[in-house]
Amino acid sequence: MQSPQTSISTTADWQAYQLRVSQLNDWRLSGKLGFRGPDNGGSASVNWQQRQEKFQLQLTGPFGAGSATLSGNQQNAEMLYQDKIYRQTPQKLATQLTGVPLPVNALSWWARGLPSPAETGVNNLVQGPTGVAASFEQAGWQLSFSNYRRKNGRNLPAKITGEFGEQSFKLIISSWSIPQL
């Protein structure tokens, strides 16, 4: 059996995968998010619902009050945390909450094993045996994707790790919910 790091697929396989999964604009995932920065770290349970450009991200974990909800779109979001509402860009709110500049907009693409079209190009793409991404670099983050599972005719990763200098995250997806084809 080929290792997932071995690229035996073709550019056509990767392009077909990108096209099929990029059309997935309505989805929900549940799992666990771990994050680490130079001075702090933590983890939270995650429930993420994406509907076209709008998202709602519920994080439950050791954030003092125990939970936070971020909702909005790529430009503007609000966060309900400790009975207060904060408004800012999604990334600034995520940084405020975790202390790590998690790229929320890109993460909505990376969760599906895809590069974000809003970020700069992709470097060092390694494909898995079926045309999925095993790893790539984007926006300074080195990303790895594994444990792909088939859901409604699409292969979706169940584990995503990202590293950017002293900052890192790990998203373990326990379940995907997507509309039927």
Image: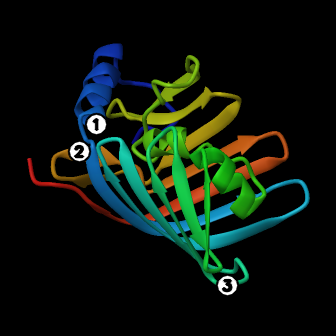
Q: Toward the viewer: 66 or 129?
A: 66
> How was this image coloured?
rainbow
Task: Please identify the residue farthest to the bottom as the structure is shown.
Answer: 65
Mark 3 secondary-structure assignment = loop
Reply above or below: 87 against 66: above
Task: Please identify the residue farthest to the left as the structure is shown.
Answer: 181
Mark 2 secondary-structure assignment = strand
The type of residue carrying mark 3 is: Ala
The residue pinned by badge 3 equals 65
Structural crowding at the residue carrying mark 3, measured as other residues with C-alpha within 10 Å and reported as few (<14), some (14–19) or many (≥20) = few
Q: Toward the viewer: 76 or 66?
A: 76
Q: Distance between the residues labelled 3 and 2?
A: 37 Å
Please report contact status of discs 3 and 2: CB closer than 8 Å, yes or no: no
N-term-proximal mark, 3 vs 2: 3
Q: Toward the viewer: 102 or 114?
A: 102
Reply above or below: 6 against 38: above
| Residue mark closest to the camera, 1 vs 2 | 1
Could one spot residue 3 in this view of the protein? no
Q: What is the quadrant of residue 132 in the picture? A: top left
The residue pinned by badge 1 equals 21
Q: Which residue is drawn at 78% across and 48% down?
A: 167
Please report contact status of discs 1 and 2: CB closer than 8 Å, yes or no: yes
Q: How far apart are marks 1 and 2 (CA)?
A: 7 Å
The residue pinned by badge 2 equals 154
